């Protein structure tokens, strides 16, 4: 038995097998060889291995997500058979007398660059696939093995770190817990874990090379403990705790259908944060009064091209229909910073959190923004939809948004497509927006305070930097004063103000928020009944 400590980002306790996800940290070296034929034979063997791995992935994906989504693995298999690709690898090996790994990596780079520079969007998107198959080949050649996440049964996923796009692609039902060596508690991966109701530990100092998939482990999100190969005695204790947690959960469920009202009669809205329509189950299960933040950018992650209007329309329509008249606030694309989509080809930046992200991308690339707005307005007739714009810093941005929205509405009118005028609000997540919240309140319908970014920008603390976690104090007086100011300015203009950042779910602050006059808290679905309990017990 080995007991390791980490930082818990979602409380919960599980017992199960681990699945180790090793990142591709292998650096390809250029090595001169005497026997090129031997290298060519190695490539052939690696191609065969890769084909077999892809077949396993394909079969699994067909069962789980259907043929259309599984087709990507067939495309990868075809690419591995491509004559030009294979000839290029052989040529590099024979003409330069170099090792197979180097020849594959160079060919992968050359081909993906070539695809990326093509005009056709479909061909452009294939650049990422070429990289993917070349990485797979290199891993098989170098003995770094299969990197696929194989979760045939619910398992504890152990990784160095996880990006939002990796997390979003996972089948949530197959994950018992996340354990990562790195990561910060305000990263989007941590947020996703909280949203999915999955116990998660970060900063666990474990050597992944010493672990293997299938080992037994326990994750305790209450104490931050990750126990490998627990003894029978410990396993029994953990199982008992799991039962106790289930009982507590059952008790909370008795609050379903009750109002969020204090003893003295003050009511507050408790809404849910979601990342995709697939999260709707958690929303309904936990009796949310609405959706206060639908992070639409997750629709754009973990794929090779922009989602089209129809695909987005279907997702938004389903969200509002499922909520049957309850409010659904959909935030427009907040990509950039830690949420990267390769196909957007955003340049590397020195300070991505202060960079080209969210509304800045939408206003400079209105062709992307307009597709989303059209989908949103089309979905508006199917329920109670509101639109929210992220990362606002000025009145001018709102004016520009308005112009684009008007163009979209006009186009829909011309096409005789029905839409409704909806509530349009903004995220207050920059200190600039806080300071001019009096002016902004006059021109928008509501505010939702994004405390994750607001804390990052106010305290000058990168939310992604795990070293700064000890300095990240979301209870900082500056943040609480800002929230108070925003709420007062909203109310003066007759508008409502809520909180959709992680701080909104902090039970230590619920009472303070209610006293401040916050109208709505939008939190991970799993927190709704816990907050309802606190509110109902308040004077
Ligand atoms: C926030 O910044 O508080 C927020 C809710 O947005 P995100 O976490 O997606 O940046
Ligand atoms: Mg934000």
Image: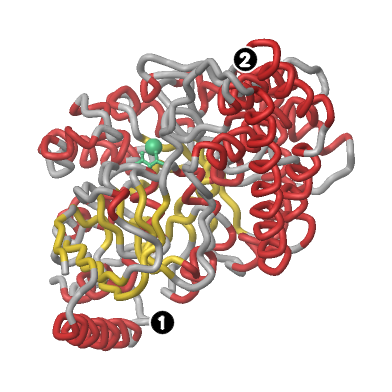
Q: Is residue 334 left or right of residue 162?
A: right
- Image quadrant containing the N terminus: bottom left
**Which is more N-terminal, label 2 or label 1?**
2
Q: Position of residue 168 (x, y in %)?
A: 51, 51
Task: Name the residue at the top extreme.
Answer: 96
User: Is residue 487 visible in this depiction of the protein?
Assistant: no
Q: Which residue is mark 1?
A: 257
Q: Disc 1 or disc 2, which is closer to the eye?
A: 2
- Against 235, residue 423 (above or below) is above
Label 2 neighbour load within 10 Å: few <14, some 14-19, many 20+? many
Residue at left 68%, top 61%?
61
Q: Is residue 165 left or right of residue 460?
A: right
**In-image side of 269 versus 510 (left or right):** right
Residue that appears at 33% across and 28% down: 430
Q: How far, Cα to Cα, is label 1 from label 2? A: 72 Å
Crowding at label 1, few (<14), some or many (≥20) Cα neighbours within 10 Å?
A: few
On the image, the x and y values in percent for residue 143 come to 49, 42
> Furthest residue to the right?
415
Quick one: 39 or 348, which is closer to the camera?
39
Q: Is residue 70 above or below residue 281?
A: above
Residue drawn at (41%, 29%) of the image: 440
Please determine whether, in this image, residue 137 is positioned above or below residue 316: above
Q: Are marks 1 and 2 in contact (CB under 8 Å)?
A: no
Tell whether 394 sits left or right of 118. Answer: left
Ligand 1 within 8 A of label 2's CB? no
- What is the secondary structure assignment of the residue under circle 1? loop
Q: Secondary structure at mark 2?
A: loop
Q: Quadrant of residue 392?
A: top left
Give the residue number, with chain letter if any, for mark 2. Answer: 97
Residue 340 in picture, x, y percent from top left: 51, 32
Quarter of image, ligand 2: top left
């Amino acid at each position: 038995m080995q007991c390791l400590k980490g930082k818990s980002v979602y409380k919960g306790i599980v017992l199960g097998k681990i699945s180790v996800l090793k990142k591709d940290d292998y650096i390809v070296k250029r090595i001169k060889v005497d026997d090129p034929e031997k290298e060519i034979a190695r490539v052939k063997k690696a191609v065969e291995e890769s084909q077999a791995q892809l077949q396993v992935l394909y079969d699994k994906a067909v069962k789980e997500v259907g043929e259309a989504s599984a087709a990507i693995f067939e495309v990868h298999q075809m690419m591995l058979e491509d004559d030009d690709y294979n000839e290029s690898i052989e040529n590099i090996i024979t003409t330069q007398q170099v090792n197979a790994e180097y020849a594959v990596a160079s060919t992968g780079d050359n081909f993906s660059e070539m695809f990326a520079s093509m005009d056709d969007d479909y061909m452009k998107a294939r650049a990422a696939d070429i990289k993917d198959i070349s990485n797979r080949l290199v891993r098989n050649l170098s003995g770094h093995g299969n990197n696929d996440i194989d979760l045939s049964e619910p398992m504890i996923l152990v990784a160095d770190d996880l990006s939002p796009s990796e997390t979003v692609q996972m089948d949530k039902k197959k994950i018992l817990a996340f354990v990562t060596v790195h990561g910060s508690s305000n990263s989007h991966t941590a947020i996703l874990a909280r949203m999915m109701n999955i116990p998660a530990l970060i900063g666990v100092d474990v050597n992944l090379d010493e672990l293997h998939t299938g080992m037994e482990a326990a994750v305790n999100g209450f104490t931050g403990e990750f126990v490998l190969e627990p003894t029978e005695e410990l396993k029994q204790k953990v199982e008992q705790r799991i039962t106790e947690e289930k009982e507590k959960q059952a008790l909370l469920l008795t609050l379903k259908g009750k109002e969020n009202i204090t003893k003295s009669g003050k009511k507050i809205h408790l809404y849910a944060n979601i990342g995709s329509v697939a999260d709707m189950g958690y929303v309904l299960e936990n009796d949310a009064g609405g959706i206060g933040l639908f992070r639409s950018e997750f629709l754009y992650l973990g794929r090779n091209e922009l989602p089209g209007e129809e695909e987005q329309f279907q997702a938004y329509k389903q969200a509002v229909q499922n909520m049957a008249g309850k409010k659904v606030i959909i935030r427009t694309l907040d990509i950039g910073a830690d949420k990267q989509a390769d196909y957007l080809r955003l340049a590397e930046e020195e300070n991505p959190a202060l960079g080209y992200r969210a509304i800045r991308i939408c206003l400079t690339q209105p062709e992307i923004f307009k597709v989303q707005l059209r989908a949103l307005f089309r979905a508006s007739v199917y329920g109670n939809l509101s639109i929210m714009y992220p990362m606002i810093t000025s009145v001018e941005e709102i004016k520009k948004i308005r112009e684009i929205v008007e163009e979209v509405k006009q186009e829909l009118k011309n096409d005789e497509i029905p839409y409704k005028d909806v509530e349009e609000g903004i995220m207050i997540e920059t200190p600039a927006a806080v300071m001019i919240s009096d002016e902004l309140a006059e021109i928008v319908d509501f505010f939702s305070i994004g405390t994750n970014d607001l804390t990052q920008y106010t305290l000058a603390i990168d939310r992604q930097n795990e070293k700064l976690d000890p300095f990240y104090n979301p209870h900082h007086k500056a943040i609480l004063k800002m929230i108070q100011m925003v709420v007062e300015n909203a109310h003066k203009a007759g508008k409502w103000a809520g909180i959709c950042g992680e701080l909104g779910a902090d039970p230590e602050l619920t009472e303070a928020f209610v006293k401040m006059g916050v109208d709505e808290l939008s939190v991970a679905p799993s927190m709704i009944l816990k907050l309802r309990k606190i509110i109902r017990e308040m004077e």
